[in-house]
Structure formats: C-alpha cells, structure tokens
Image (spheres, rainbow, N blue to C red):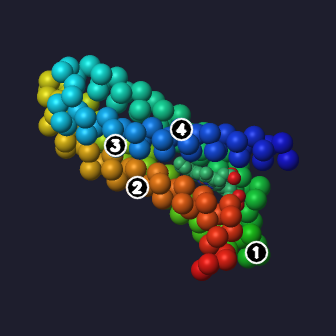
Amino acid sequence: MVDIVVSRIAHLIFAAIWAGSVFYVAVVVLPLARDGAFNSTKPLEVISRKLTTISRVSSLVLFISGSHLAGVLYTVDGGSRDLFTSINGQLVLLMIALWLALAALVEIGAKRLESGLNGKKLREPAHDVLPIFQAATVAAVALLVVAGLITTGGAIRFF
Ligand code: HEM
C-alpha cells in the first residue's frame, strides 16, 4: 500500500517538473533567444544542459514509478484491469508511448541547440529547435490529459 502512495507522489511530482520545465523553455526561453534577448550563448548553454538533466532524471523516476504502478494496478488476465484490453490499460500504454516521445524530443532538441551554440550562433539555433520543443510541449500536455482521463475515469465514462 505504502509503495503505491510513494509511487503516485513521485510520479506526480516528476510529471509536473518535467512537463513544466519543457513548457517554459518552449514558451518563454527559446522565443526570447530567437528574438535576440540574450547577448551571449552561455545562459542558453546552461539552460539546455540543466533541462537535459531534469529530463533524464524525470524520465527515469516516471519510468520506475509508472512501471511499479502498472505492475500493481493492472493485470494481463483479460479482466477489467487488463493492461491491453481495458480502456485505462490502453491509456497507460499510450502514456508509455508519449513518455518515449517526450524523452526523445528533449534529447534531440537539446543536442541540436548545443551544437548550434557551439558554433557561436544564438538566434538561429533557437529558431531551428523551437518546433522540436513545441512538439515536446504537446507531448507533455497530452500526457497530463491522458493522466486526467485515467485518474477520473473520464475515458470510461465518455468513450
Ligand atoms: C514509462 C512511463 C510511464 C508509465 C509506465 C506510467 C504509468 C502510469 C500508471 C500505471 C499510472 C496509474 C494509473 C491508474 O491509476 O490506474 C499513471 C498515472 C499517472 N501518470 Fe504515468 N506513466 C509513465 C509516464 C508518465 C509521464 C511521462 C507523465 C507526465 C509527464 C505521467 C503522468 C502521470 C500522472 C499525472 C498520473 C496520475 C497520477 C496518479 O494518480 O498516480 N506518467 N502512470
């Protein structure tokens, strides 16, 4: 029981941290950099490196806590909590796919941004990676929508 409480709390904390930091970079930091608000590459390099660390730690904690919850709360026996045939089970699988997409998009975006900044350019790399971080933001918000559907039973009621 206590393991479920700890997993749920860890899952929620890191979901908020990860989604929030990706959202902030896509909506505030990169548009500012693209529009020339920074006059050196240093702040953006630090932001990108820290975001990568936040993303890696969050994805690991979410994977571990989420796998534990899936193992404890779901079955593969064809019953009402079956991971593959129940609506909530399928939403958990969708959560895993979106988790993978979010992690990959942040890795790709940060790598490209850092290599652009290494070339001593600033506005151009910020402009180029913005769509990648916007896509990551869509994945992050979609994850929270999926979580909302799971925890409120919304999908079961409406679909
Ligand atoms: C491998 C990755 C993941 C797995 C296996 C996973 C699995 C799960 C499971 C099994 C649940 C509980 C479902 C239920 O109560 O029936 C859950 C809840 C939730 N997940 Fe995930 N998840 C993953 C990644 C993510 C990510 C990346 C986010 C958001 C950034 C996220 C956000 C949430 C939220 C907000 C909840 C509801 C919190 C709660 O009451 O536990 N998950 N997840």
- Left or right? Give the position of 13 relative to 52: right
What's the distance in space between the residues labelled 1 and 2, CA to CA? 30 Å
Decide: is 151 above or below 18: below
- For badge 1, the amino acid type reads Ser
Q: Residue at x 60, y 58 (%)?
A: 147
Name the residue carrying label 2.
138
**SS type, badge 2:** helix
Q: Check if mark 2's residue and mark 3's residue have beta carbons within 8 Å.
A: no
Question: Is any atom of residue 37 visible in this view?
Answer: yes
Name the residue carrying label 3.
26
Labels 4 and 1: the sequence-earlier one? 4
Q: Which mark is residue 29?
A: none
What's the distance in space between the residues labelled 4 and 1, CA to CA? 32 Å
What's the distance in space between the residues labelled 2 and 3, CA to CA? 10 Å
What's the distance in space between the residues labelled 4 and 2, CA to CA? 15 Å
What's the distance in space between the residues labelled 1 and 3, CA to CA? 39 Å
Quarter-of-image position of residue 10: top right
